[in-house]
Image: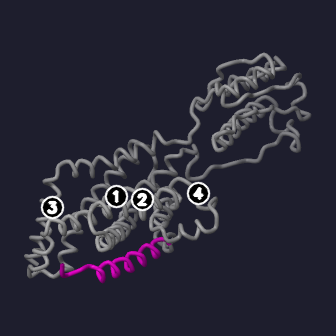
Amino acid sequence: MKGFSAFVKKEFLHILRDVRALWIILAMPVILVLLFGFALSNDIKKANIAVLDSSGDVLAARITERINASEYFRVFKILASPAEADAVLKSGAAKAVVTFPSDFMRDIPSGAKINIACDACDPNEASSISAYIRALAFDQLRAEFGAARLESDANAEPGIRFLYNPQLKSSFYFVPGVMGLILFLVCALLTSVGILRERESGSMEILLTSPVRPLAIIAAKALPYVLISVVVITEIFLIVKFVVDVPIVGSVPLLYGVSLIFIALSLSLGILISTIANNSQTAMFLVLALLILPTIILSGMVFPIENMPLPLRIISNVVPATWYNIAVKDVMLKGLGFSDVLKPVGVLCAMTAAFTLISLARFKTKL
């Protein structure tokens, strides 16, 4: 036990002495969470909208004012002709053009429609813009006419509720995936590179000749990264709660528990990669190719898994971050309990056990 604690102390000192690496470890969660929480956003904010009002009536003016007053749009121009509408869309000056037909206010109870033309080069953005404009316009119509006067077949809209993310913020979607990405970088990458650097410098051979068993050496090298990862997770939770403004609805201890399982899984993958790679550069490449890229592309972090082709959906099931992403979203955003996330947690535990056994079997006790 004394020898094991000495090895753990040595690993801590090794990490603390590398000030630049330590700053990267602590700063990386802040940068990534803020980047995905604010910069990489699909949210609509102050998009330029042009209006072509062929009616000139009061109702069209009020709907235009309501659209302009929202946080999503800015009515930057009132157009005079359909040709001008086509020009502002082609030039990219406007994301959408809202057209009111002639005699709009008089004909609305019998089915007059607002026409919304969107720049659909970005289909997701166009879909969001059109949905927001329709919702704002219909709210104004209800205020003017009342729901009873609007004919259901022509004008009634279905009632829509957005649960768990009422403002449709993209940060709610990105942040859980970023947590898995950060843990892979901290645990898998640093563990594999650290072990291989020990081998390249020749110090691993000295460690293996010590009275401490190889399993204890591996545990001693992994333990500091477990503690650092807990600090990183705490840092992420604080940023998510107080800076990015993503709520943590569910149990915080359960989130820590799921994260610890994923940390153990990441460490086992890091050790496994260290047994495959010949040097630290190869280990970095393997972590990037086998862990980081699949986490970004196939885990549901950026792209919905349901929209992928069948072969990619099958592959996504063996990406560990997929199950971590599911569990974190269910607990953090939906407030579900342990019994509700048994499946993803069970898959993570099975993967952890499998990769740990494989990595220990492949770890060479003699050089």
Q: Residue at point 12% right, 59% down? A: 13
36 drawn magenta: no
* Mark before the other along the chain sequence, 3 or 4: 3
Identify the mark at residue 12; answer none if there is no mark: 3
Q: Main secondary structure of the magenta part?
A: helix
In the displayed structure, would residue 308 be above or below residue 74?
Answer: below
| Callout 2: SS | helix
* Mark before the other along the chain sequence, 2 or 1: 1
Residue labelled with disc 2: 292
Q: Are the two marked residues, 2 and 1, in contact with CB atoms closer than 8 angstroms?
A: yes
Q: Residues within 10 Å of mark 4 (few under 14, many from 20)?
A: few
The quadrant the C terminus occupies is bottom left
Q: Which residues are magenta?
A: 344-367
Q: Are the two marked residues, 4 and 2, in contact with CB atoms closer than 8 angstroms?
A: no
Say which amino acid is labelled 1: Leu
Say which amino acid is labelled 3: Phe
